[in-house]
Amino acid sequence: MSEVLVLVDHVDGAVRKATTELLTIAARVGEPSAVYIGTGFQDAAATLARFGAVKAYRIESPDLTAHLVAPSAEALAQLVERTQPAAVLLASTADGKEIAARLALKIDSGLITDAVDVDADLVTTQSVFAGAYSVRARVSRGTPIITVKANSVTAQERPGECVDEQFTAVISPGAMSARITGTRPRQKSGRPDLSEAAIVVAGGRGTNGDFGPVEAFADTLGAAVGASRAAVDAGWYPHANQVGQTGKSVSPQLYVAVGISGAIQHRAGMQTSKTIVAVNKDADAPIFELADFGVVGDLFTVLPQATTLIEQARG
């Protein structure tokens, strides 16, 4: 059975949810093999084994972690040349897609980004044109390189033994021309990461800058908080929380759009959500065309009532 390489998305050894989903997809195609770049592998090993990684390639050179993504792409290209995998899977993050693009050029292979599903024969499904169409595609040249959106599949545990192997890559001086001079951890809100959250509650222009009811409702659901471009441009919420074509693309199990009209720019970032609920006082808002469930009403009345009912139901 051919290997399927999965680039591990992690933060200091903490494996992100998207990677466990990629390992589940990899098991459909062949033998899942994790590629771990950076330090902290021992903290990640148990999670990788629990979700079916049969092998893990450790690439621990400081040349990779001290620079931007170019060294990682070079290291991954060298590993691909050695192992000749059936495919390479990466998370559809900004870094993941840049590494994938650089890798495709280095090994002269086809690339598919933002897939929402991958079949056993490596035929992918993408949601395009703001979700209006689904495209089925397959890489026809070289080793398929595919980036997959988070929450596209349900991660399945497949406990077993994960054999780790150290891999040494030779990084060119050109790849190390951009060095990371400093990092600053993002302030933690206590809520799930927007890109990986199973539930997202997003507020828009209709909040008039008051995200209090949105945050309170999100907290009762254990949800992440998102914002439309209009809310972000107005300075009401951080850009890191923007959902849309120029923000983050999310595919949660439940997406609640509050005070968001549903412009195509926003729809492009959330239309692949499994269930969509809209709250808007404008009955003609475009978001209702997309929603599975809709509430026509003032969010400042609807959300507090919903929050209270959920809290009461939980006792």
Image (cartoon, rainbow, N blue to C red):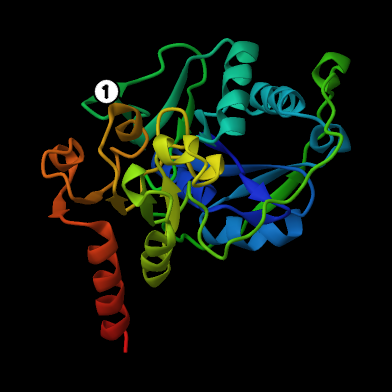
Q: What's the residue at 54%, 39% (across, down)?
A: 239
Does residue 186 appear left or right of residue 223 in this picture?
A: right
Q: Quadrant of residue 97?
A: top right
Percent x, y for residue 27?
44, 45
Nearer to us in this view, 36 or 127? 127
Closer to us: 283 or 35? 283
Q: Residue at x 28, y 28 (%)?
A: 264
In the displayed structure, 251 sits above or below 162; it is above
* Identity of the residue drawn at 40% across and 36% down: 230
Q: Total of numbered circles in the picture? A: 1
- Give the percent coordinates (x, y) of residue 304: 30, 70
Residue tagged by mark 1?
Answer: 135
Crowd band around label 1 with a 10 angstrom C-alpha radius: few (<14), some (14–19), many (20+): few
Label 1: state its secondary structure.
strand
Q: Is residue 153 visible?
A: no
Disc 1 residue type (three-letter): Val
Q: Report x, y in % for residue 294.
A: 15, 52
Q: Which residue is at the far bottom? A: 315
What is the quadrant of the C terminus in the image?
bottom left
Residue 108 can be seen in this image? yes
Q: Determine which quarter of the picture holds residue 170.
A: top right
Residue 6 drawn at (x, y percent): 56, 39
**Please, which residue is most extreme toward the front here?**
208
| Residue at the (26%, 83%) spot, across then down | 313
Q: Is residue 49 left or right of residue 76?
A: left
Query: Quick one: 153 or 194, which is closer to the camera?
Result: 194
Question: Seen in the image, is 276 located left or right of residue 147?
Answer: left
